Image: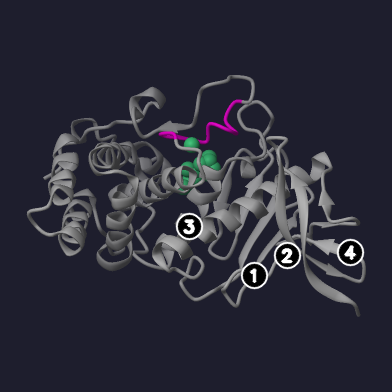
């Protein structure tokens, strides 16, 4: 059979045309990227509104993925590549497990499904119902959020419950902000590109002002609940706000290095917010010294949210 790695184009949900790393086999083009240094590949599928995974490869006849029903797949494929690049170029991490495993994404999962998730092996994106969400792969911060769950699961493996769970969520929001900023799209919001398409300017969460979307930003307002695994998507506002203070103090790059070191070298499955403060302080000391402004920024940021 005749086959080769190819470079194509595609139109994502934003309407912009992007360059895609594709693969051609017997005259059909696949969303199958073999261009990364990892021995794995980036491959994107569609569940065709079903729920079996990974589903079918997304293909095209002329290597120009321009049709509207391909937009969600174009976004998932392209944004997965950007997120891979961030972890490899910035931290030398080869895929989510630092072992070059494939990045597998499936779009068009379920019917009007208002969610996205990492299922332990791959990323899965719903189409949204068109009111609460548009197709959920349409936002780089959401793709980076999901892939960071995979990084967390293969490192600290923070239990998805109560404070460790809120920390798990916060780590995904932290790197979502950083990956967007690295790609020239900096903001403190999560999901602004896919949340409530009919309401411009809002988002799912704000790290600058968690209260905007009913999240606390201080330990005094920690939300005790049994819902949502102990409020992991609510209480993440507290470590998120601490990151906002720290990054405003020392910048996103240094913050990203401190957070990556804490996530991969010090945090463990039961780490709580106090443990996160200590892990981040230790990481800042390792990288910049105990008397550094970076160390002080971590201490101040956590103190400002009532921790430490
Ligand atoms: O925070 C999340 N998952 O833990 C979300 C929920 C809606 C967006 C896609 C996945 C963000
Ligand atoms: Ca954002
Ligand atoms: Zn999450």
Query: In screen coordinates, is 103 left or right of 170?
Result: right
- Residue 84 % position (x, y): 53, 61
Q: Nearer the viewer, residue 144 or 123?
A: 144
Label 1: few (<14), some or many (≥20) within 10 Å?
some
Asked which secondary structure carries label 3, the reply is: helix
Dividing the picture into quarters, in which one does residue 122 lie? Answer: bottom right
Residue carrying label 4 = 28
The answer to if 165 sits in the magenta stretch is no
Which secondary structure is most common in the magenta stretch?
loop
When the figure is inspected, residue 28 is found, relative to residue 18, above or below; the finding is below
Dividing the image into 4 quarters, which one contains the C terminus? top left
**Mark closest to the chain's N terminus, 4 or 1:** 4
- Residues shaded magenta: 187-196
The answer to if 192 sits in the magenta stretch is yes
Q: Give the color scheme: rainbow, by chain, secondary structure or one colour.
A: one colour
Ligand 1 near label 4 (Cβ, under 8 Å)? no
Label 2: few (<14), some or many (≥20) within 10 Å?
many
Q: Residue at x 53, y 31 (%)?
A: 192
Residue that extends furthest to the bottom in the rendered view of this protein = 1
Q: CA distance from mark 2 to mark 1?
A: 7 Å
Asked which secondary structure carries label 4, the reply is: strand
Query: In screen coordinates, is 185 left or right of 226?
Result: right
When the figure is inspected, residue 149 is found, relative to residue 299, above or below; the finding is below
Q: Nearer the viewer, residue 97 or 124?
A: 97
Q: Which mark is residue 41?
A: 1
Label 3: few (<14), some or many (≥20) within 10 Å?
many
**Mark closest to the chain's N terminus, 4 or 3:** 4
**Mark closest to the chain's N terminus, 3 or 1:** 1
Are circles 2 and 1 on residues that touch, CB within 8 Å? yes
Q: Which mark is residue 86?
A: 3
**Mark closest to the chain's N terminus, 2 or 1:** 2
């Amino acid at each position: 059979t005749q086959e080769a790695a190819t470079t194509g184009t595609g139109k994502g949900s934003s309407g912009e045309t992007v360059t895609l790393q594709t693969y051609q086999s017997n005259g059909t083009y696949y969303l199958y990227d073999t261009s990364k240094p990892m021995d794995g590949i980036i491959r994107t599928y569609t569940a065709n509104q079903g729920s079996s995974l990974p589903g079918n490869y997304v293909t095209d006849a002329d290597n120009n993925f321009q049709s509207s029903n391909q937009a969600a797949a174009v976004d998932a494929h392209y944004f997965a590549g950007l997120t891979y690049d961030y972890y490899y170029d910035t931290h030398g991490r080869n895929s989510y497990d630092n072992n070059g495993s494939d990045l597998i994404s499936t779009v068009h999962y379920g019917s009007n499904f208002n969610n996205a998730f990492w299922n332990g092996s791959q990323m899965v994106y719903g189409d949204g119902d068109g009111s609460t969400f548009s197709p959920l792969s349409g936002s780089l911060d959401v793709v980076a959020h999901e892939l960071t769950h995979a990084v967390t699961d293969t490192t600290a493996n923070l239990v998805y419950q109560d404070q460790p769970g809120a920390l798990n969520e916060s780590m995904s929001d932290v790197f979502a902000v950083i990956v967007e900023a690295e790609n020239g799209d900096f903001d403190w919001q999560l999901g602004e590109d896919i949340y409530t398409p009919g309401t411009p300017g809002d988002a799912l969460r704000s790290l600058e002002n968690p209260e905007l979307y009913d999240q606390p930003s201080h330990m005094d307002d920690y939300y005790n609940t049994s819902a949502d695994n102990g409020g992991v998507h609510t209480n993440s506002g507290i470590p998120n706000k601490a990151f906002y203070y720290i990054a405003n103090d020392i910048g996103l790059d240094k913050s990203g290095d401190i957070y990556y070191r804490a996530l991969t070298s010090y945090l463990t499955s039961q780490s709580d917010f106090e443990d996160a403060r200590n892990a981040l302080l230790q990481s800042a000391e390792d990288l910049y010294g105990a008397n550094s402004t970076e160390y002080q920024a971590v201490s101040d940021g956590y103190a400002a949210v009532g921790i430490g």
